[in-house]
Image (tube, coloured by chain):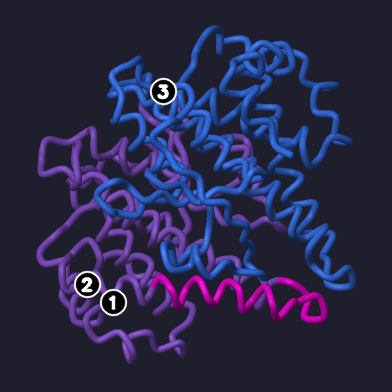
Chain colours: A purple, B blue
Amino acid sequence: MKLYFSPTSPYVRKVTVLALETGLDGKIERLPATTSPVEPNATIQRANPLIKVPTLETDSGETLFDSRVICEYLDSLHQGPKFFPASGAARWTALRLQALADGLLDAALLLRYEGFVRPEEKRWPAWQEGQLRKIRGVLAEIEKQAPGFGERVDIGTVAVACALGYLDFRYADMNWRKDHPQTAAWAAKFFERPALKATIPG
Amino acid sequence: MKLYFSPTSPYVRKVTVLALETGLDGKIERLPATTSPVEPNATIQRANPLIKVPTLETDSGETLFDSRVICEYLDSLHQGPKFFPASGAARWTALRLQALADGLLDAALLLRYEGFVRPEEKRWPAWQEGQLRKIRGVLAEIEKQAPGFGERVDIGTVAVACALGYLDFRYADMNWRKDHPQTAAWAAKFFERPALKATIPG
């Protein structure tokens, strides 16, 4: 398999963490590729008209995206404990948590384009505040849920870890740990997993 | 179940189409709710920190989002033909197609916020062009795939129909049918399904 890959993309990190956790990492060739809405990468564009990473080319030549689809696909290729619970309440809990974490990331990425990529005179404070509101709301919700995470290692908790790691990487001055001690305690432990340690963005 | 609902949201339409197609619609109470990043709806915010529709409250009091999670949840509640193939190539084909259509919608929504909601002097042509590039790319990819859609009715083709319907609704002057005759022929037939006819945005 081939993975279009950027070391700073938190969605790529989700995929790479899953690949490492499931022992599939050695079967994935990484094709470095950086892209953005205003500087599209032509190679990725040929594989994925959304021009986004991660994009996976499978061994049978199919192209898969986005990160949720790739992660679930990888999870179907191994025989170990599954990151996507097959059915029932555990599945909806994991998928909702992934959606929550991905939603934080969507907001954080839009905030970054707004505050660092868009020309300064074209930035719109109300838009930035709107994205920050989502980030703060998700952090508050995760803080409520964190005491119940326990030893859960599934696509939901992996996505949360990647979202928090992205805040550390791009918004360290947000200092999310300060007001979210339960989340911080959980993350301190989860970040010790080798797959997380091997994928710190930078 | 209760669904936070906006009649103009294409992601809500996906959920409503699925509810109608699977016979679950009568079990869903709709709570009208309009929201945007710059005008957040406080009621939705209490249910979903991402402050987005669709958001579903299940009969057991769980809250589910986003549209992909809600659609798959609804698909687990009925005994008819499944919209999410259980496994194998059919599943990845359907999920990839859903991701493609959702990606078009993400770009179309960002384009709309940029061109109609953001103050005029703060609009950035390169950003608009970047989103249009994605929309055009997805339309070209759908045009390639459309001859193979046949009679497929799954979450992929439903998502494509909702994406095309959104372009009709908000970007009629884009006239996507002109350069995408295969897609237009497929859509003309798919739009005749009662679930699609019952959910035309406006």
Is residue A120 inside the magenta stretch? Answer: yes
Chain at tag 1: A
Left or right placement of residue A119 versus residue A57 in this view: right
Query: In this rendering, would B93 be left or right of B186?
Result: left
Q: Which residues are magenta?
A: A118-138
Quarter of image, res B189: top right
- The residue pinned by badge 1 equals A143
Chain hosting mark 3:
B
Q: Is residue B27 above or below residue B3?
A: above
**For mark 2, what is the residue?**
A146
Q: Quadrant of the N terminus of chain A?
A: top left
Q: Chain of mark 2?
A: A
Give amino acid for label 1: Glu
Q: Could you tell me how far apart the alpha carbons at marks 3 and 2 are, in whole angstroms?
A: 36 Å
Identify the residue at horizontal 19%, vertical 52% (top origin): A21
Are the residues tagged 2 and 1 within 8 Å (C-beta)? Answer: yes
Between B136 and B196, the one lying in front of the other is B196
